[in-house]
Image (spheres, grey):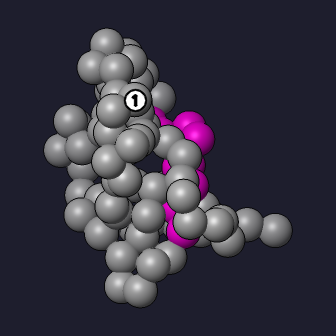
Amino acid sequence: MMRRESLPIASIYVPVKRRAELNPATVDELAESMLQAGQQTPILVRRDGDRFILVEGLHRLEACRKLGEATIFCYLVDARKH
């Protein structure tokens, strides 16, 4: 079973291909929701040496970043490299 962890946002790398999928309106909506209810769904990351690579949850990550959060809830998964 996966365990929810809290990681520093600064330690999470977003691949360039993922960044192209970013929708600012979605980030704004999620940020507003997080202000009211907190982060409901953790993002997915995989370990790559000393950093973590985003697997799923770009808009949630960016919403937390926009809100000035230093950490984000995530699940550490084993995933193949893109």
The 10 Å Cα crowd at callout 1, few under 14, some 14 to 19, many 20 or more, is few
Give the left or right position of residue 4, taking residue 22 as reference.
right
Can residue 3 be seen in the rendering of this structure? Answer: no
**Residue 13 in which image quadrant:** bottom left
* Residue 52 placement (x, y as % from top left): 42, 70
Q: What residue do we see at 47% from left, 29% from top?
A: 37
What residue is shown at x 56% (from left), y 66% (from top)? 81
Number of marks in the rendered image: 1
Image height of 33 relative to 42, above or below:
above
Residue 39 drawn above or below residue 31: below
Say if residue 21 shows up in the picture.
Answer: yes
**Residue in the foreground of this view, choosing between 25 and 80:** 80
For numbered disc 1, what is the local secondary structure? loop
Residue at the spot x=46%, y=56% of the render?
Answer: 54
Residue 44 falls inside the magenta stretch: yes
Q: Find the residue positioned furthest to the bottom.
A: 49
* Residue 10: x %, y % from top left: 24, 64
Give the residue pinned by disc 1.
21
Start-end of magenta stretch: 38-46
Quadrant of the snapshot with the N terminus? bottom right
Is residue 47 part of the magenta span, yes or no? Answer: no
